[in-house]
Structure formats: C-alpha cells, structure tokens
Amino acid sequence: MAEIKGKNKEVLMTEGNIARQLLFFSIPLIIGNLFQQLYNTVDSVVVGQYVGKAALAAVGSSNSLINLMIGILTGLATGAGVIIAQYYGGKKEEKLSWAVHTAMAISILGGLLLIFLGIALSGPILKMMGTPESVMPSSTAYLRIFFLGSVFNMVYNIGAGILRAVGDSKNPLYYLVFASLVNIGLDLLFVIVFNMGVSGAAWATITAQAVSALLVMRKLMTCQGPYRIFLKKIRIDRIMAGRIIRFGVPAGIQNSIISLSNVIVQANINSFGDAAMAGCGSYTKVDGFVLLPVLSLSMAIMTFVGQNVGAGKYDRAKKGLWVTYGITMVYVVAVSLLLFAFRTSVISIFSNEKEVIKDGVMMMELLMPFYWMISLVNVSTGAFRGAGRSFMAMMIMVVNLCGVRMLWIWISVPLAPKLSTVLWGYPVSWITAFFCCLFFVRTKWVQEHGVQPEK
C-alpha cells in the first residue's frame, strides 16, 4: 500500500498498486479541472446569452492571449513540482522545504510581473491579432481586469502544485470546487443583476481566484509536513531557483510558444468575423471537458514518475506510464463519443445564432476524432518531465504544436482560405506529435544518469 501521512493526505507513490494510486490521485484532479472548466464555461454562457454575440467573441478571443502571457510562469510551477516530487520521493526534507519557499517567492514576483505586462500589452497585442473593432473595447477590458488577479492565480497554481507533488490531490480539489461556486454565483450577480457585461465576468473570475489562493496558502501554512510554508522564509534562494528554472523554463517556453501559435491561429479565425470567433470560442469551452482531465492525468504521471525517479525505481516509473495510457484512452473515447452525439445541442447552449452554432459544430466534427492522439501526447510529455526530461518534452511540443501548426497555416490557408483549413492545423500537429512521442517512449527516457536534481 502507498504510504499515507496521516491527516495531511500526502501520498508516497513509490510502493503499492500502480493503477490504484494513479486513479485515486487523478480523480480529484479530474473533478477539479472539470469544475474549473465549468465556471469558465458559465462565464461564456452567461455572457453569450445575456450580453450578446460580440461579448461572447470578446471572451473567447481572449483565451489564447491569456495562455500566452501566463505560459512561462506556469512552466516554472511545473518545474517546481518536478523538483518537489523528486525530493519528496527521495525523503530529502530539508531540500524540500527549501524548494517550497523559493517556488512561492517566484509565484508572487511572477504574478506582479504579469499584472504589469497584462495591463500594458493587452490592447496592442489584440490589435496585432486583428481583433475586430466591434469587440476590441470588451476584449481589452476583460483582459486588463483578468490580469489584475495574476498574483492570486500564480499563488494558487504554485500552492496546488506543491500539494500535488507530495501526493495530495484532494485539498486542491476542495478549494477549486468552492472557488468555482463563488465564480458562478458572482457571474450571475455581476452580469445579469448588476448588468456589468464582460467586465462583470472578469471581476467574478479574479474574485474566485483570490478565494482559491487564500485557501491553498492557509493549508500550506498550517500543515505539519516538511512542505509547510512559513511567511518569513519565503524568499528566492539563488541555487534552488536555478534548479527550478532548469526544470521549469523548458515547460514555460513550450507553453508560451504553443500559446503564441494559438494566438496566430486565433488571428486567422478572427479574420472570418465575430460569428466564427464566437463559435470557435464556444467550442474551446466544450473541448476543455475532454482535454482538461487529460492534463490532470499528465500531472498525475508527472508526480508518479518524479517520486519514483527520486527513489531510484525506474521500472516502476515506466509501468506507471502504460497504466496511465490505458486510463486516458478509456476516458477520452467515452467522453468524445458522448459530446459528438449531442454536438449541436451542446454548442447551442452558448448562443442561439445559426452561424455561431454552425462554426462551433464544424470545429467539433473536425477535431474530436483526433483527441485520443493529443491526449497520449500530453500524458507522455508529463512522464518525460517527471523523469527530468523537460527539454525533450519541450522540443516535442514546440516543434509539432507550434512549428508544424504554423507551417500548415502559412502554406495551406493562402491556398484554401476557409475556416476549416485554419482548424485542420490542430489535428495535423497532433498527429506528428503523437509519432514523436511514440518514438521517444521506446527509448531510455527513464534512466539513472542525468534525470535527477542535484543531490
């Protein structure tokens, strides 16, 4: 059986039944991500139904830019999680505490930087993306308010990452569920009752982020484990920061470059008008119900592999990856078939306009048959990061999800300037990434030398 450390709920995953550990660790992550996607979806439903198509387009077109701005810093959170998982698996408590306090200091400084960059650059980047004038004021207002909550966003993500790295996936779930309910309630209050429009949805989101950040900090400051946070110890240690950066920067670069490619894709979608923007933006909320749980499984295998690499159990780390593949395929195929069967009804939740529904349904029909491929890619790269192979994971994702996707846009769209041509860039890049992962999984991606942080 896995070793469970009392009431703190952290789990050491270096012993016991692999499938059971991964499932019990993954389920809270999956439920939490589904709740997060639910309140993001409620944002769009409330805005689309009670404000209008232009407002829905404004919220939808903001997603790729938000991901671009926070990509590098969430990558650092990933790097911190790998370090913490490996120290926890290796039972190096002093270094674990050292890493936790440095990671939290990075999150606070990074959040402050995001506030400045987000407010300053939102307008210019939206113009570069070709955002129509009809939605520019709403898009800019939404983004600037959203980035005001960057410190809360970063603190929660780093804090939740610390808990997950030591095997506690339940407490982050509780905090996320509560924050989701706060967000939904405030969406209804600000948008429908107070008639605040897109700005109301943004204020609801950052208020919920503040709630989740406070809850996760309270847990970390009151727990009894070696990962407990003391405010007076929160500072950046140069050596530990260097280790976190070495593991995290590849993930951050990957996130940002892929997000940049999605900004370019979004700019091409924008050129087809606000109906295309609203339809594709609506669908991205739907596909989150497939892909976000997969990202949860990717985090689970990263923690599992990280702890087992830290303990020197490389064969167990490999077995965990294959078990996660099986769990992922069952989930993705089942949910994809369900959503595909009710595709028109699902998209019509966001808008009653025929053009919006048509474009959203077209995107679903085109992308959903390939979701199993990108899902296995995400799980594979999560395992690579847990083993310390962050650079390899970065190159697979950047070369394919950015390079291949951009080549497709630049070559194919001028030849066939249609919305469907733009959208085909997604499955094409997923297919090439899948075959790259298949190649690397068959190599020695887990081995003793070169995968662990410095002793």
Image: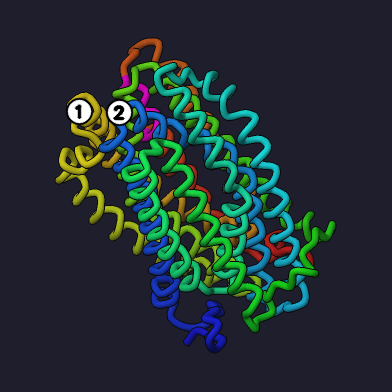
The residue range painted magenta reads 419-427
Kindly identify the amino acid type of the residue bearing the numbered disc 2.
Answer: Lys
Kindly identify the amino acid type of the residue bearing the numbered disc 1.
Answer: Glu
Query: Which residue is at 63% across, 75% downward?
Result: 89
Q: State which quadrant residue 239 falls in.
A: bottom right
Q: Main secondary structure of the magenta part?
A: helix
Residue 69, given in percent of the width and then of the height, sits at 59, 38
- Which of 80/197 is in front? 197
Apparent side of residue 86 relative to residue 67 in the rendered image (left or right): right
Apparent side of residue 379 relative to residue 147 in the rendered image (left or right): left
Q: Residues within 10 Å of mark 2 (few under 14, many from 20)?
A: many
Task: In the rendered structure, find residue 53 and report the number of the disc placed on it.
Answer: 2
Residue 210, given in percent of the width and then of the height, sits at 55, 57
Residue at the spot of label 1: 353
Residue 241, given in percent of the width and then of the height, sits at 78, 56
Q: Secondary structure at mark 2?
A: helix
The reply to whether residue 181 is visible in this rendering is yes
Task: In the rendered structure, find residue 417 and report the number of the disc placed on it.
Answer: none
- Is residue 83 shown above or below 229? above
- Which of 403/449 is in front? 403
Asked whether the residues under the numbered discs 2 and 1 touch, taking CB atoms below 8 Å apart as contact, a structural biologist would say: yes
Furthest toward the right, the residue is 238
Residue 54 sits inside the magenta stretch: no
Residue 366, given in percent of the width and then of the height, sits at 27, 33
Q: State which quadrant residue 167 falls in.
A: bottom right
Quadrant into which the C terminus falls: bottom right
Apparent side of residue 195 relative to residue 454 in the rendered image (left or right): left
- Point out the tag, 2 or 1, that comes first from the N-terminus: 2
Q: Secondary structure at mark 1?
A: loop
Query: Which residue is at 66% across, 60% downward?
Result: 80
